[in-house]
Image: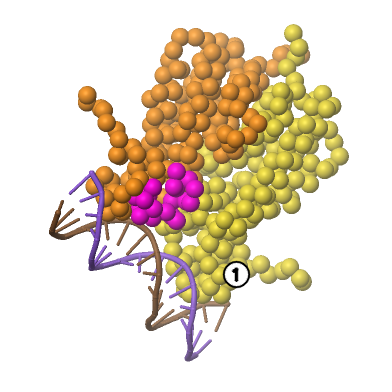
Chain colours: A yellow, B orange, C brown, D purple
DNA sequence: GTCTATACGCAGATAGAC
DNA sequence: GTCTATCTGCGTATAGAC
């Protein structure tokens, strides 16, 4: 039992993410976060040194986590096509599982300290670099055929991340539909070489 | 001379956008914005009723403006392919021209009042609906061949808007390169029907 | 680990002269 | 239209008991 009982701290992060997502980081006070957990404002400082530290924890949960959980799929055996398809699926499913946290990270990153912001940015850059590498690998095998791997990587990351901005669970569109549609869009259309003449 | 001399007010909006983009809306005080214009903090209240009104003006400049300037391209004569290509180009060029304003709008939208946020959101939804309509038009003529026009529209808008997040003017990649690359990616790959068999 | 009580600084906003 | 001076409230953070 070394890494057990992630109760209170994670509970705070989760509650904070929901509150930040609904009312915006600035508008939310420590008292509001505390209330959402069921304790008093001052008690939060037993778990976090500052409000910004809570926001930082939220941001890490959606930048560090994908690097550790999703990126390994790119090292699994299989063709670039298969690995890219697996990445698209896992990425979207992660975005869905942690949608509130993603929205907060996306919208409130500006409120991080420069130091924390640099860490978060580095995680994101790393992820993008790995995506670009698979695109390049697929170009080498001839499975993919885009003019510029870097540009394609930007486009792919932006398409995927955009998901959390517009997806709503209550609509006539299931996550699985988006996954299938986006695998087709990204792997079978965007990346696939144009049939020559 | 009815709509002339947009001097001071626009000057404030432009200066505020730069400051917000660099330090974040929350961290920036009215005194900072004023200093960037060369006046005192209190003087700002002659032009705007509140700090949030300035942010609102920034957001409108990148949501209302494209609707008025870029969307008419979709009503011009030409095939869906041509009109979509024109939209991609104009959209990216607008994003580039107003990149700081876009970054602010993208990151600080959470700080708008619910009323103002609703207006901004409506502008964005309208834009997206028009994009989806061209995709649908192209499907009708057979020029485009995607499984779901709505999903494709989301993907396209996200690819385009993502641009302002990663593009830097000083790198070895010119705006024109991105325009050409993205027209190819979006129109000739993502939307084009797969050659059958 | 959570509480009550409180310090305190800062940023948004106002009043009124020029 | 811009200034100086000032108010005011709110929200983070601390002190210290339980």
Q: Residue at x 48, y 39 (%)?
A: B100
Q: Which residue is drawn at 27% across and 54% down?
A: B42
- Closest to the observer, B146 or B11: B11
Q: Position of residue B39 (x, y in %)?
A: 31, 49
Q: What element carries label 1?
A: helix
Question: Mark 1 — residue?
Answer: A8
Q: Give the range drawn in magenta.
A: B18-36
- Tell me: A88 left or right of A35: right
Q: Is residue A141 visible from the viewing direction of this image?
A: yes
Q: In which quarter of the image is the N terminus of chain A?
A: bottom right
Which chain does the residue under circle 1 lie in? Answer: A
**Quick check: is B29 in the magenta stretch?**
yes
Residue A106 lies, with reference to residue A196, above or below; the image says below
Q: Where is residue A64 in the image (x, y as percent from the top left)?
A: 68, 53
- Tell me: A61 left or right of B13: right
Q: Which residue is drawn at 26% across and 28% down?
A: B4
Q: Where is residue A99 in the image (x, y as percent from the top left)?
A: 58, 48
- Closest to the observer, B6 or B191: B6
Q: Residue at x 67, y 44 (%)?
A: A125
Q: In which quarter of the image is the C terminus of chain A?
A: top right
Magenta stretch, main secondary structure, is helix
Residue B64: name its quadrant: top left
The tally of labels here is 1
Q: Is residue B117 visible from the viewing direction of this image?
A: no
Q: Position of residue B141 (x, y in %)?
A: 56, 10
- Tell me: B195 left or right of B137: right
Residue A164 lies, with reference to residue B97, above or below; the image says below
């Amino acid at each position: 039992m070394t890494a057990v009982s992630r109760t209170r701290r994670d509970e705070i992060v989760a509650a904070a993410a929901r509150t930040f997502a609904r009312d915006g980081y600035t508008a939310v006070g420590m008292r509001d976060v505390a209330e959402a957990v069921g304790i008093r404002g001052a008690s939060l400082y037993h778990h976090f040194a500052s409000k910004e530290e809570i926001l930082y924890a939220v941001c890490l949960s959606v930048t560090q986590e994908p690097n550790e959980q999703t990126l390994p799929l790119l090292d699994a055996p299989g063709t670039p096509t298969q690995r890219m398809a697996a990445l698209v699926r896992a990425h979207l499913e992660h975005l869905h599982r942690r949608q509130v946290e993603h929205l907060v990270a996306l919208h409130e990153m500006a409120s991080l300290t420069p130091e924390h912001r640099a860490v978060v940015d580095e995680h994101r850059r790393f992820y993008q670099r790995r995506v670009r590498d698979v695109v390049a690998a697929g170009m080498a095998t001839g499975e993919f055929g885009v003019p510029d791997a870097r540009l394609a990587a930007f486009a792919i990351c932006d398409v995927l991340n955009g998901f959390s901005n517009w997806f709503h669970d209550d609509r006539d569109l299931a996550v699985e539909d988006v996954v299938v549609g986006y695998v087709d869009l990204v792997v079978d259309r965007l990346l696939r070489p144009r049939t020559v003449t």
